[in-house]
Amino acid sequence: MTADLSVDFCGIKSPNPFWLASAPPANSAYQVMRAFEAGWGGAVWKTIGEPIVNVSSRYSAVDLEHRRVMGLNNIELISDRSIEENLREIREVKRHFPGHVVIASLMVESKREVWHDIVRRAEDAGADGHELNFGCPHGMSERGMGSAVGQVPEYTCQITEWAVEAATRPVIIKLTPNITDIRFPGRAAKRGGAHAVSLINTINSITGIDLDTFVPRPIVGDGSTHGGYCGPAVKPIALNMVSQIAGDPEIGLPISGIGGISTWRDALEFMLLGSTTVQVCTAVMHRGFRIVEDMIQGLSDWMESKGFTACTDFIGKSVPHVRDWGKLDLNYRIVARIDQAKCVDCGLCYIACEDGCHQSITKERANGRNVYTVVDDLCVGCNMCSLVCPSPGCISMVQVDEGKPFETWEMRIARTGSSAAAWAESMGKH
């Protein structure tokens, strides 16, 4: 049976979960319509507000060995085109693609009547919903907008309430990661009546410095500023924050996941942690709109291989597996195993373990080559050797069945009577 990739996101129906994020790829009707022709299910329009003046240059990147744009930093602000022009183009897109999703990303000054006005105008243009940009970490935040709102739960709640008062279509709150605990603004959005949240927005960053001029990048004359970091490098941070929102019983809102999504596998990980839709920016800027073809095919093939017929069959399936550290099994034990037939004698496992971990791999010379062996009694199952090994399948992590019952740190404290006694017992076992 063919997999059905369509989703219902807080009442907004989309042909698939793949959306363009509010960013340069969703800056115009021309771009969004080309994206829809390529297969994208929706687009969140580049943030609309009172037009601003952008600087040049705007982007800088972090490369990792041979991979370009592992992380992307930008100091670009919201749309530099008028509200009227943007809304006119939204209306045009919806006329040509009525079955696709167009979300208006909005950012205006913190006044009730101003928010009422922009929300109503966006709905008149045909927008399927509103994403309130409470996450922009640079430029707009200095003006009391963007992350300046998202970092203060009271402001998040208040402005959400204003938007909801005027809206007849879903209001989505875009959360900033530049905060100690993202659940606080998430809960504030819920209190304000939000229909969904999206996360994460970009992370405050300086990606590098020109060592000849001493000016940080991107360079604007003889100066620069902090910017918003995105791309594959931020994916682990985004996944964690999505899981925090998805696992919080006080929030319970649909999630649109954002942050370093480049492939169908990335998108799937966000969906397994509770995202109904996913938004993509940097990967499109790097490789173009057609990456969605592989994303659609890959997700569809995976669903069919697992027997899933709809996205609702697996959305959030990983959330129950994310637990506090104190609820993990202390008696679960794995050790490394080295397949000598696959070993290429690079020595990376030995170096990593000897210098950086637990000195549990020995090195001996035999038959003209080095032989690396794991000492089970010393191995703590940290995984580092398997992570650095360049030979596929050479190092595996194998569970050692010691017959010990399931026991968490919390259970051990309850059994021993104190955390100090539990710690002493743990140290005695090692």
Image (cartoon, helix red, strand yellow):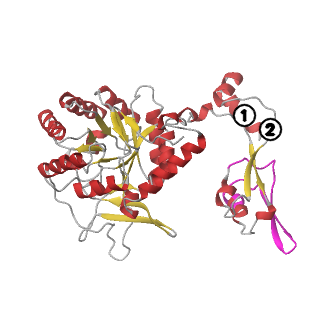
* Screen quadrant of the N terminus: top right
**Residue 175 image offset from top left, x and y in percent:** 34, 41
Residue 306 visible in the shown view: yes
Q: Residue, x 81% and y 36% (percent of image)?
A: 402
- Towards the viewer: 271 or 89: 89
**Does residue 86 appear to the left or right of 72 in the view shown?**
left
**Residue 213 image offset from top left, x and y in percent:** 32, 75
Q: Which residue is mark 2?
A: 401
The disc label shown at residue 127, or none: none
Q: Amino acid at mark 1?
A: Ala
Q: Which residue is mark 1?
A: 424
Q: Mark 1, residues whose alpha carbon is within 10 Å: few (<14), some, or many (≥20)?
A: few
Helix, strand or loop for disc 1 = helix
Q: Amino acid at mark 2?
A: Asp
Q: Residue, x 30% and y 37% (percent of image)?
A: 172
**Does residue 79 appear to the left or right of 14 in the view shown?**
left
Q: Mark 2, residues whose alpha carbon is within 10 Å: few (<14), some, or many (≥20)?
A: few
In primary-sequence order, the first of circles 2 and 1 is 2
Magenta residues (range): 353-382
Magenta run includes residue 355: yes
